[in-house]
Amino acid sequence: MTHALALTMPLPTIIQGGMGVGVSDWRLANAVSALGQLGVVSGTGLDTVIARRLQDGDIGGHVRRAIEAFPFADVAEEALRRFFRPAGLAEGTAYAGVPMFRVGTNRFRDAFTVLANFVEVHLAKEGHGKSVGIIYLTKIQMPTQPSLYGSMLAGVDYVLMGAGIPREIPGALDLLSRHEPGHLKLEIDGSPDPEADVLSFDPADVGMGGREDLKRPKFLPIIASNSLATMMVRRSTGQVDGFVIEGPTAGGHNAPPRGKKVYNEQGEPLYGERDVVDLDQIAEIGLPFWVAGGTGRPGAIEELKRHGATGIQVGTLFAFCDESGLTEEYKRTVIREALDAPVHVRTDDRASPTGFPFKTVGLERSLSDDAVYAKRARICDLGYLRVPVRLEKGSVDYRCPAEPEADWERKGGESDATAGRRCLCNALMANIGLGQRRSDGSTEPPLLTSGDQLSEIGRFLAGRDRYTASDVIDYLLG
């Protein structure tokens, strides 16, 4: 299918938000897409997610079923040999890791990233013939190209990207659709020549490519300002097909407030008039757009369509439905508390190592309070949020303000930058039951995230203690 023909396909009214690591997994995306809306899988950390599912025995055989459809058998065979454990891991046994990303090609790491993204999209698209999307964080740079390529091999229909300015991604999609090598700028702290720092990916280097052209998916950047929308249209390296306009009440990472930071009594950054997107101006650009943040309610679709919107993106309501990837324990805990009283969601601009404000869920029966997290020994063994840094001798190292303080400072990081940081890489894996088991007998603690509308979920629940993705869609359309 050509790109021009793809643009004539019906546009969804509801986009299911891409949440955390594996919360918006293939089961949720498959259910939403089968109902005629756009299901979206999270592309963050999929290599680790798939590796750990295999080590847990691949219950139901879904991962292996998708791997059988992967067009490069040698990569599939090596993945199974390295990670599949038919009986699962013995209790307390640590998961084997995938090599952390570094500058330069690591054939297995890159190939397994392609495979992992293929698997999740393939499963999300099974059985319904409808559109499926995938979402990535611009801030996580090094896995981007092999991840995109894997999702495109599986026929992904939409790519969404937030947490940054993904200006180069449209051009990368064009190149990858033809199996051609691509180059994205790499942000390296302390680099004397930022223009010279690039990330390269060539499908041929990992034994792939050389087949007929792939479908080029539609690209939807997630933005929080009118100026960014205009810039993306004018200066991107290829075609932008629409936008998701995300307000500061949305879950996960938020754009920081524009202008001088002001905090409320709880230490949360305050947003003002400068942070409100003029939807009428967005409509004048002439591209489809969906609005996220505070839109998970009946009537929002009609209200926003009057400003030119195509529809809405909703995450919070889907996050706690039966099909989401959150563990049953965490879903049941949040729903029980929401039925008793509003659940508070805090906007914390210290929790995320990225520096972006991050929403955290506060619970009376806490799953991830400060006291629990303070006992955790700092360790950086997944590394998705590490940032490359050029050292004095010219070599490149990697640092994260959530890693051990001594390591951070040894690499030139400022000492006060580590206070309050959480290891989101490990915590978000714990949210979906894939937390690493540590040598002291502990398992990584979770850190739940949600949009501000979690405080109102009790109204939607109407006394129910569980619900489905279909219930969410009926509620939003009604």
Image (cartoon, rainbow, N blue to C red):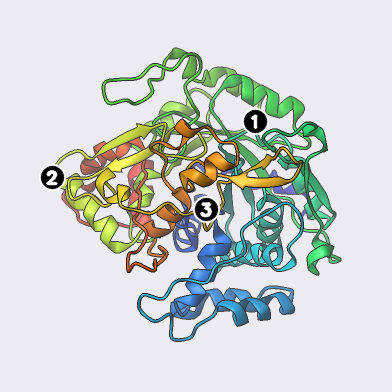
Mark 3 or mark 1, whichever is nearer to me = 3
Q: What amino acid is found at the position of numbered circle 3 in the picture?
A: Ser
- Is label 2 in a helix, a strand or a loop? helix
Q: Say the numbered circle drawn on residue 42.
A: 3
Q: How many residues crowd around disc 3 within 10 Å: few (fewer than 14), some, or many (20 or more)?
A: many
Seen from the viewer's position, the closer of residues 386 and 182 is: 386
Tell me which label, 3 or 1, sits earlier in the chain. 3
Residue 213 seen:
yes
Residue 326 place in picture, x, y as percent: 36, 58
Q: Return the residue at label 1.
A: 287
Mark 3–mark 1 distance (CA, rounded to whole Å): 24 Å
Q: How many residues crowd around disc 2 within 10 Å: few (fewer than 14), some, or many (20 or more)?
A: few
Tell me which label, 3 or 2, sits earlier in the chain. 3
Residue 220 place in picture, x, y as percent: 62, 39
Residue 14 place in picture, x, y as percent: 47, 43
Is 293 displayed left or right of 245 in the figure?
left
Seen from the viewer's position, the closer of residues 311 and 214 is: 214
Residue beneath the point at 64% across and 52% down:
157
Marks 3/2 in contact by CB < 8 Å: the verdict is: no
